[in-house]
Amino acid sequence: MGNRISLKYLMGLGLLNTAYSMYVVISRPLYGNDVYGEWFVFYLVSAEYTPALFSFIVGGLSDVYGRRRVLWLSLLGSLLLWHLFTVENWVLKILAVAGYAFSHNLAVTIALSSVLEDRVNVGRNYSWAALAGSTGWALTTTVV
């Protein structure tokens, strides 16, 4: 994992999972217990994982338009996540989570593809990527 670009993508994976785990740690008890009830958590989880089915299709656009442009597009997801905590309508909350999950999965797809370009060290590079993502997840859930 000699080049700096791969290191940047690994750091990005760690930060992505840090933000995502903060969202999960805050949203589950807030919306599941206090505001809407357990039924809302089922919709929330569906909205988180369903967009992953489409992100790999759009991830192929990075081959056409370039990784940086598509990664800039995925940054819009953080704005959608902000709306999760500012709007009152539960349908808009679900749509905000779905948009965030789509952009999150898009960024992860592009980051992993860049890390795995080196075919010789693909196993080691993927292990580093998994470690970066897991570290971001573990640190945040422990601290928050």
Image (cartoon, helix red, strand yellow):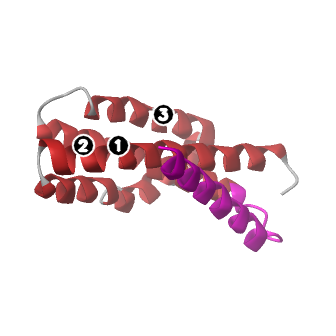
| Residue type at numbered disc 3 | Leu
Mark 1 closeness class: few <14, some 14–19, many ≥20 residues within 10 Å = few
Mark 1 touching mark 3, by CB under 8 A? no
Residue 23, quarter of the rendered image: top left
Query: Along the line of sight, which residue is nearer the eye, 9 or 116?
Result: 9
Query: Marks 1 and 2, Cα distance to the nearest angstrom?
Result: 6 Å
Residue 131 placed where, x, y %?
A: 67, 61
Query: Marks 2 and 3, Cα distance to the nearest angstrom?
Result: 25 Å
Residue 100 placed where, x, y %?
A: 37, 42
Q: Which mark is residue 75?
A: 3
Q: Tell me if 113 is positioned left or right of 97 in this view.
A: right
Q: Residue at image x 77%, y 69%?
A: 124
Mark 3 closeness class: few <14, some 14–19, many ≥20 residues within 10 Å = some
Asked if 30 appears above or below 142 in the picture, the reply is: above
Residue 41, quarter of the rendered image: bottom left
Q: Residue at image x 61%, y 41%?
A: 66
Magenta residues, start to end? 115-144
Which comes before the other along the chain, label 2 or label 3?
2
Mark 1 touching mark 2, by CB under 8 A? yes
Q: Which residue is mark 1?
A: 26
Secondary structure mostly taken by the magenta-highlighted segment of the chain: helix
| Residue type at numbered disc 2 | Leu
Label 1's element? helix
Q: Which residue is mark 2?
A: 30
Q: Residue at image x 17%, y 36%?
A: 92
Residue 54 placed where, x, y %?
A: 36, 57
